[in-house]
């Protein structure tokens, strides 16, 4: 045991077990790893389809736990761990700008951070060809998407995103934690497309929740 262990109480970011290094305990890490499966689906914004790459099915309990904790604990080690997970879903040889679908204002004010932006910034540090850029802001009030039906979801986020930079890069990767119908990230893409720049967008998510037979 190191002397520092007496002073720093380090716990697994998922189950709370005492650990000595890293973000999660060996058991949680092994379980999370067993569920990693990089796949992709498509979402449509108007008639244009976009690739969404993701690692997990949202239905897996430990994945839900991880996402829940990322939203509520400002834990730098857990952000680093999530950064490694996002990186696994990157398109091969991707070079370009990384941004995130911004958290609702109410969550950002309550917890003081954005649970997708924090890991994405870490992911871009020291990785050649990746640069984080904050491109989109979220405006006005919107409810939590998970409480709403498919139509209500689309309405809830409509026109809530504004692009804040004038010089929009061509090749953009948008990260988000969970994708369900794709309406939130679709609005984000729509805001980027409305700038008139012909941008190429790929989406990377940690988990996909397939509760609707049709998505869009
Ligand atoms: Zn654990």
Image: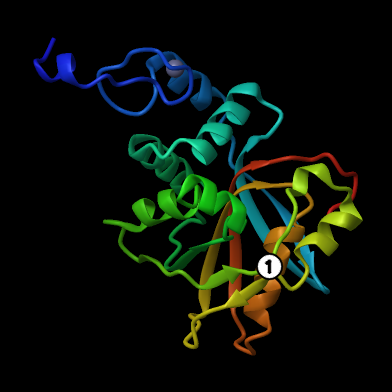
The percent position of residue 75, horizontal first and vertical second, equals 38, 36
| Residue holding disc 1 | 140
Q: Please report the residue visible at 31 percent of the width from the left and 16 percent of the height from the top.
A: 19
In the shown orientation, is residue 187 left or right of residue 89?
A: right
Above or below, 79 against 113 in this view is above
Taking the spot 44% from the left edge, 48% from the top edge, the residue there is: 87
> Residue 104 falls in which quadrant of the image?
bottom right
Q: Quadrant of the C terminus?
A: bottom right
Which of these two is toward me, 92 or 159? 159
Q: Nearer the viewer, residue 128 or 111?
A: 111
Residue 194, horizontal then vertical, whole percent: 68, 84
Q: Residue furthest left?
A: 3
Dot 1: within a 10 Å radius of its alpha carbon, few (fewer than 14), some, or many (20 or more) residues? few
Q: Residue at x 61, y 45 (%)?
A: 54
Display colour scheme: rainbow
CB at mark 1 closer than 8 A to ligand 1?
no
179 relative to 10 in the view: left or right: right
Q: Depth check: give the residue in front, 179 or 156.
A: 156
The residue at the point 52 percent across, 53 percent down is: 109
Quadrant of the picture in which ligand 1 is shown: top left
x and y, in percent, of residue 93 in the image: 43, 60
């Amino acid at each position: 045991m190191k002397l520092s262990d007496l002073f720093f109480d380090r716990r697994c970011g998922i189950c709370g077990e005492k650990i000595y290094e890293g973000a999660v305990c060996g058991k949680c890490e092994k379980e999370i790893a067993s569920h990693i499966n990089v796949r992709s689906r498509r979402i449509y914004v108007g008639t244009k389809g976009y690739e969404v790459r993701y690692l997990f099915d949202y239905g897996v309990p430990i994945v839900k736990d991880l996402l829940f904790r990322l939203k509520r604990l400002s834990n730098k080690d857990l952000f680093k761990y999530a950064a490694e997970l996002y990186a696994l879903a990157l398109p091969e040889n991707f070079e370009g700008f990384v941004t995130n679908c911004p958290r609702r204002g109410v969550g950002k004010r309550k917890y003081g951070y954005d649970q997708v932006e924090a890991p994405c910034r870490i992911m871009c540090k020291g990785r050649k060809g990746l640069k984080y850029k904050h491109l989109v802001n979220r405006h006005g009030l919107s409810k939590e998407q998970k409480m709403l039906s498919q139509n209500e979801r689309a309405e809830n986020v409509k026109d809530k995103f504004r692009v804040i930079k004038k010089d929009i890069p061509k090749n953009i990767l948008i990260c988000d934690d969970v994708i369900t119908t794709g309406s939130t990230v679709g609005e984000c893409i729509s805001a980027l497309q409305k700038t008139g720049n012909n941008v190429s967008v790929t989406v990377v998510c940690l988990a996909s929740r397939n509760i609707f037979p049709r998505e869009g």
